[in-house]
Image (spheres, helix red, strand yellow):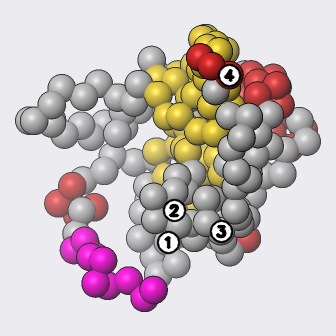
Amino acid sequence: MRESSSVTRKNTEFELRGVNHLALVCADMKRTVDFYQGVLGMPLIKTIELPMGWGQHFFFDCGGGDALAFFWFPDAPEGVPGVSAPKDLPDRGELLSAVGSMNHVAFDVPPERIEEYRDRLVAKGVDVGVILNHDDSEFGVAPENHDGVFVRSIYFKDPDGVLVEFAAWTRELDPPSDVRHEPRTAADRTV
């Protein structure tokens, strides 16, 4: 987690300073620029024409010194909802995507502005889910914000169906109590 959360754990193997960039694939670079720069306000900071007609690679500043990048390939296959990304928003019952896919990208936002940001996205014509209060209850979300909520978020999709989240940390995480589940293995899968 970043400075927005008061918990930091030191990596003793590598000096990782955050995410340099996350690279996704779009069907229409102009539409992508219109959405990420025009709707979300992310400055376009670098554009590249790939050699030999392979396509384009554009970078947007997403804050904190990090970038969100997109490739446009003239021969990229179409995405498959439920495989390359979830079919719908999590509050509408969809979360599944395939192994090796990118399920969603979450941007850190100030907790006191989550309602305002949802309203602004809706005013811009973006289909936005309800505000989710993520907690450790049976279903992982609560109807109201309470002391056990660790992050509040909203989900929406970009023009290519990429699931995007605005997430706001609401409390300090405590690794002894917040890291308590044994990781599952491939043998635990049902497919």
Residue in the image at 29% along x and 24% along y: 17
Looking at the picture, does residue 62 appear above or below residue 121? above
* Towards the viewer: 174 or 73: 73
Question: CA separation, marks 3 and 4?
Answer: 30 Å
Give the mark toward the camera: 3 or 1: 3
Question: Dividing the image into 4 quarters, which one contains the N terminus?
Answer: top left
* Towards the viewer: 44 or 4: 44
Looking at the picture, does residue 60 appear above or below residue 100? above
Q: Amino acid at mark 1?
A: Gly
- Find residue 82 and name its label: 3
| Residue topped by disc 4 | 53
Q: Residue furthest front?
A: 52
Mark 3 neighbour density, 10 Å: few (under 14) some (14–19) many (20 or more):
some
- Residue 146 visible here: no
First reached walking from the N terminus: tag 2 or tag 1: 2
Q: Amino acid at mark 3?
A: Gly
First reached walking from the N terminus: tag 2 or tag 4: 4
Question: CA separation, marks 2 and 3?
Answer: 22 Å
First reached walking from the N terminus: tag 3 or tag 4: 4
Residue in the image at 82% along x and 25% along y: 30
| Residue topped by disc 1 | 140
Q: Amino acid at mark 2?
A: His
**Residue 115 falls in image quadrant:** top right
Mark 4 neighbour density, 10 Å: few (under 14) some (14–19) many (20 or more):
few
Give the mark toward the camera: 3 or 4: 4
| Residue topped by disc 2 | 134
Instruction: Give SS at disc 4.
Output: helix
Question: CA separation, marks 4 and 1?
Answer: 46 Å
Magenta part of the chain? 181-191
Give the mark toward the camera: 4 or 1: 4
Instruction: Give SS at disc 3.
Output: loop
Question: Dividing the image into 4 quarters, which one contains the C terminus?
Answer: bottom left
